[in-house]
């Protein structure tokens, strides 16, 4: 039944169309599909017959009547079943199996609704330059696209940054985070992992004994040519990690895609959508196929390897508030992630719009349909947090986000609807970040910083409940924050904040369809004893 | 120009909302935003579209069921289809 339901779920509404129109469909058509309904009926008969024979099922069952009955029940699903609903495929199948009543009565089971799943909390990393000069923002035009490598960086030192980044994420995995996130950016000092999958492969290998998801946020489709390169690398990561991949498929920022990688802004979204469709098809197709699109033409698509997670790994689409991306995310049943540096207060009206789109399109407001990135710093007290983190927070907002505003919207990059929306209702910050100091950033919610209690309460109130978010990402290495201090931040968050957030959605019974299935039921892992003493 | 995949996805949506018998090739062309004539460039008939829509899901469903039935698991597990 799970297999049958699962097929419905994954091929909604295609199989529904078939079932509803079965009788209208001519005999010749069935032959063309090369599948006989009789054969399918025989599968069910065979199962019932076997069960009766070996004593698992009640001995008085009439094989034919019972198997027709079961099949009828399943084929009626098109009348009422909706994907991504309150119950998971498995739970619906359990209910129907119970209804079929074929098994010999077993001791009573507790049939009350299972409690929902724990929220997923992942550690995000940008991999920034940690030692930009104090007058960087005065001397240079931008941290992105144009900063001169030879003046600002040293390859050996940067090698150290990459190693710290990996160690910090691995430490987060060890401390009990649910996932570790990397991302792709180009030609900048703010976050430079040009290929997140190189980082992801190290993380996948070294977390193979854990239940930590490898959240790639992710490889950018429009900058990969042909884009099936991303499909291949993700499939590799999924194989390597034993099915723990979350496949982030971002559009990519205008800086990366248009200014650094030369994609015409007008084509950016269209290319993305074509590449997205190609990626999903390449993961799932059972046969070699040709792709003859507007931007990509491939005579033979036949991906090796394919992902372990079937039909494909969970897909997250990071965005920055374009309404066309809301529509896209809902229609494609992906998790929409707002990667914000301005905090929850600034994101509120935008995320409200997202949830409106979700419900307008007839979907349930499952919090796991949304992800959000929040900057967080924790210390023993609020005062200590200011003392330890203030300059790193200011470094991040003053230097790492230092770019000319026109970089964000080269003409043609926004589509018409989003452009009209953003001009008539500017959600983007208009304040000058360089005028703000640590206390402003904390007060306005850009950063959530303070004692564990302060951080927990604000995250819960403003981010998790305020934005209705089930997949939370936290940025714990911020700007110039050194390695040791980052580990402290990670450890304190994992020990004193994370456990109190985890169960917030449990009572509502939602299923996180956007998390690797084998990790969904994974029990919350309290940080291992003594973890602080044995840092990565 | 619309790709065949876009057309097939649009056809699935139209069939789902209007029903297969009531849906016309023009409805599908409208959903994609192309002319009816352009659609015939990709497929010959409405039935072709239905075929393209259901071919793969049905084949996969049969394959999975075949594997489950042939496996060594107890019948109750086969019935619930627990992987």
Image (cartoon, coloured by chain):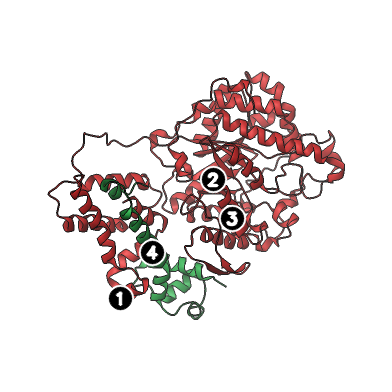
Chain colours: A red, B green
Task: Measuring from the top left, give residue A481's x and y in whole percent.
Answer: 72, 30
Q: Could you say whether the residue bearing mark 4 is in a helix, strand or loop?
A: helix
Q: Position of residue A433 (x, y in %)?
A: 73, 38
How many C-alpha atoms fall within 10 Å of the one at disc 3: few (<14), some, or many (≥20)? some
Say yes or no: labels 1 and 3 on the same chain: yes
Residue depth check, mark 1 versus mark 3: number of the one nearer the observer? 3
> Of the residues under marks 1 and 3, which one precedes in the sequence?
1
Q: Which residue is mark 3?
A: A232
Instruction: Choose the circle earlier in sequence order: 2 or 3.
Output: 3
Q: How many marks can you see?
A: 4
Q: Are marks 2 and 3 in contact (CB under 8 Å)?
A: no
> Is residue A283 toward the left or the right of residue A403 in the image?
left
Residues under labels 1 and 3: Cα distance?
A: 39 Å
Contact between labelled residues 4 and 3, with CB atoms less than 8 Å apart = no
Does label 4 lie on the same chain as label 1?
no
Q: Are marks 2 and 4 on the same chain?
A: no
Residue plotted at (42% across, 55% down): A10
Image quadrant containing the C terminus of chain A = top right
Where is residue A518 shown, x and y percent of the image? 45, 42
**Mark toward the start of the polypeptide (2 vs 1):** 1
Residue picked out by circle 4? B59
Q: CA distance from mark 1 to mark 4?
A: 18 Å
Alpha carbons under labels 2 and 1: distance apart = 42 Å
Left or right, A122 with respect to A262, comes to left
The residue lying at 56 percent from left, 46 percent from top is A240
Secondary structure under the numbered disc 3 in the rendered image: helix
- Residue A26 has which mark? 1
Which residue is drawn at the image coordinates 30% and 56% (left, top)?
A: A77
Residue A17 location, quadrant:
bottom left
Disc 3 to disc 4, C-alpha distance: 24 Å
Could you tell me which residue is drawn at 66 percent across and 46 percent down?
A: A198
Residue A172 occupies which quadrant of the picture? top right
């Amino acid at each position: 039944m799970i297999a049958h339901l699962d097929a419905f779920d994954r091929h909604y509404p295609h199989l529904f169309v078939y079932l509803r129109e079965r009788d209208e469909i001519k005999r010749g058509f069935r032959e063309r599909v090369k599948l006989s309904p009789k054969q399918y009926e025989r599968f069910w008969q065979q199962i019932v017959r076997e069960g009766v024979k070996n004593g698992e099922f009640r001995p008085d069952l009439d094989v034919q009547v019972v198997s027709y009955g079961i099949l009828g029940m399943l084929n009626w699903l098109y009348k009422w079943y909706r994907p991504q609903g309150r119950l998971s495929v498995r739970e619906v199948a359990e209910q129907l199996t119970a209804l079929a009543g074929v098994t010999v009565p077993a001791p009573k089971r507790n049939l009350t609704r299972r409690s929902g799943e724990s929220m997923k909390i992942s550690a995000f990393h940008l991999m920034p330059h940690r030692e930009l000069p104090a007058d960087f923002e005065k001397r240079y035009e931008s941290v992105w696209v144009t900063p001169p490598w030879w003046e600002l960086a040293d390859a050996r030192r940067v090698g150290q940054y990459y190693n710290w980044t990996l160690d910090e994420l691995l430490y987060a995995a060890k401390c009990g985070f649910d996932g570790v996130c990397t991302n792709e950016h180009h030609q900048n000092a703010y976050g430079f992992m040009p290929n997140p999958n190189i980082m992801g492969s190290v993380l996948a290998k070294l977390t193979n004994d854990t239940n930590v998801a490898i959240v790639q946020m992710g490889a950018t489709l429009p900058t990969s040519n042909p884009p099936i390169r991303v499909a291949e690398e993700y499939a590799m990561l999924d194989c390597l990690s034993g099915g723990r991949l979350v496949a982030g498929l971002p559009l990519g920022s205008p800086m990366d895609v248009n200014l650094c990688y030369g994609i015409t802004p007008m084509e950016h979204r269209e290319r993305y959508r074509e590449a997205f469709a190609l990626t999903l098809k390449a993961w799932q197709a059972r046969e070699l196929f040709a792709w003859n699109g507007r931007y990509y033409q491939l005579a033979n698509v036949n991906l090796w390897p394919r992902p372990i997670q079937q039909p494909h790994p969970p897909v997250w689409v990071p965005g920055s508030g374009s309404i066309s991306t809301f529509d896209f995310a809902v229609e494609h049943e992906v998790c929409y992630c707002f990667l914000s540096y301005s905090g929850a207060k600034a994101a509120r009206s935008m995320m409200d719009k997202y949830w409106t789109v979700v419900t307008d399109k007839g979907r349930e407001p499952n919090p796991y349909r949304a992800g959000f990135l929040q900057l967080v710093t924790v210390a023993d007290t609020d005062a200590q947090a200011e003392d330890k983190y203030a300059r790193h927070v200011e470094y991040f907002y003053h230097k790492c986000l230092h770019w000319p505003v026109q970089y964000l919207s080269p003409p043609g990059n926004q589509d018409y609807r989003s452009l009209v929306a953003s001009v008539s209702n500017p959600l983007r910050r208009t304040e000058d970040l360089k005028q703000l100091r640590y206390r402003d950033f904390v007060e306005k919610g850009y950063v959530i910083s303070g004692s564990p209690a302060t951080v927990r309460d604000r995250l819960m109130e403003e981010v998790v409940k305020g934005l209705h978010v089930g997949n939370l990402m936290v940025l714990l290495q911020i700007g110039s924050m050194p390695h040791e201090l980052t580990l402290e931040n990670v450890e304190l968050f994992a020990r004193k904040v994370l456990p109190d957030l985890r169960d917030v959605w449990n009572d509502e019974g939602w299923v996180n369809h956007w998390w690797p299935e084998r990790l969904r039921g994974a029990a919350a892992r309290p940080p291992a004893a003594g973890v602080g003493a044995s840092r990565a | 120009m619309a790709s065949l995949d876009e057309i097939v996805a649009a056809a699935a949506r139209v069939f789902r909302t209007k029903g297969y018998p009531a849906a016309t090739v023009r409805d599908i062309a409208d959903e994609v935003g192309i002319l009816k004539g352009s659609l015939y460039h990709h497929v010959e008939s409405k039935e072709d579209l239905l075929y393209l829509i259901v071919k793969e899901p049905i084949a996969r469903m049969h394959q999975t069921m075949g594997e489950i039935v042939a496996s060594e698991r107890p019948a109750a597990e086969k019935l619930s289809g627990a992987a």
